[in-house]
Amino acid sequence: MIDARLEVDSQLLFTDRAGPGYWDDVWGRAALPPPVDAPQRGVGKYVIRRMHKLFDQYASGLPRGTGFIEVGCANSPWLSYFAKRYGFRVAGVDYSTAGCERTEAILSREGTPGDVIHADLFTPPSGLLGRFDLALSQGVVEHFEDTTEPIRAIGALLRPGGTVVTIIPNLVGFLGPLQRLLNRPVYDVHVPLTADHLAHAHERAGLSVIAASYFIPLNFGVCNLAGLTGVRRVVWRLLIAALVRISYAVWYLDDRIRVPETRVFSGSVYCIARKE
């Protein structure tokens, strides 16, 4: 791990609803995720297949050795995926110490070279600026009151012509109230955003939007029970497990007949934008 030191806490610059302490607690208790394999058959691999299809649109045409960075890389298997699948030179940045340590452990487990930088997105090492051709953030920008500012900071890491892929949970549909009911503290560290809101934030950050929409027709798996304990956790976990079976049924159908992805039901929101 490259420790760039957190010279300025982003909470002092921009209102971050979560913060490093929140994520150190989350990742300190988390297990390492399994490897992200190339797309496989089966309903259980549906989300991975969909993500692969999305990434392939913007990554498959780039040459081997392309610079890729994941912003908010804590405990992420995606660095290894992009290195192996596309031959990219990969790096990740995160302000959580525990999260960075887990990402390093994943890269080591997968035998993948890559840089993991412990730094604040708003004060990154100067060597990261203007260095990358593709940036990915998943579940990052929606934790800030002003969505534009973290997107602007991500854009600063890109070369001209570089692309950013931003994915966030969809909390403006019915999954938002469900998350609030299940686990209000987790809901409260998010800013619910529509696809239009996310696209406009990228535009305000000086990026040209290529696409912005809803993603995955239904995904109860995005409901987060982190921090719940005792009987409450057991009950809600059983409920979510049952609801996930409904997601599986929808995914099975979507593999065969197209199921619409909508603001009300989709599990995620994404935006693809380019730095001119």
Image (cartoon, helix red, strand yellow):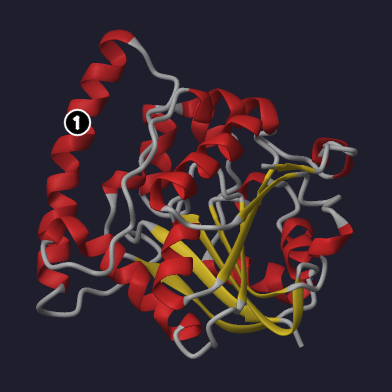
In this rendering, the count of numbered labels is: 1
Q: Is residue 148 left or right of residue 250?
A: right
Viewed as shown, does residue 218 lie left or right of 137?
left
Give percent across and percent down for residue 33. 36, 42
Residue lying furthest top in this view?
230
Q: Nearer the viewer, residue 46 or 89?
A: 89
Q: Residue at x 52, y 24 (%)?
A: 28
Local secondary structure at mark 1? helix
Image height check: is 276 above or below 138?
below
Give the amino acid at mark 1: Leu
Residue shown at 67% from the left, 25% from the top? 21
* Residue 134, visible in the rendered structure: yes
- Rendered image quadrant of residue 230: top left
Q: Which residue is mark 1?
A: 239
Image quadrant in which the N terminus is located:
top right
Task: Describe residue 165's horizontal placement relative to residue 215 as left or right.
Answer: right
- Mark 1 burial class by Cα count in 10 Å: few <14, some 14-19, many 20+: few
163 above or below 124? Answer: below
Identity of the residue drawn at 9% across and 78% down = 256
Q: Measuring from the top left, give residue 242's x and y in whole percent.
A: 13, 37
From the viewer's side, name the closer residue of 183 and 19: 19
Residue 16 image offset from top left, x and y in percent? 73, 39
Quarter of the figure with the C terminus: bottom right
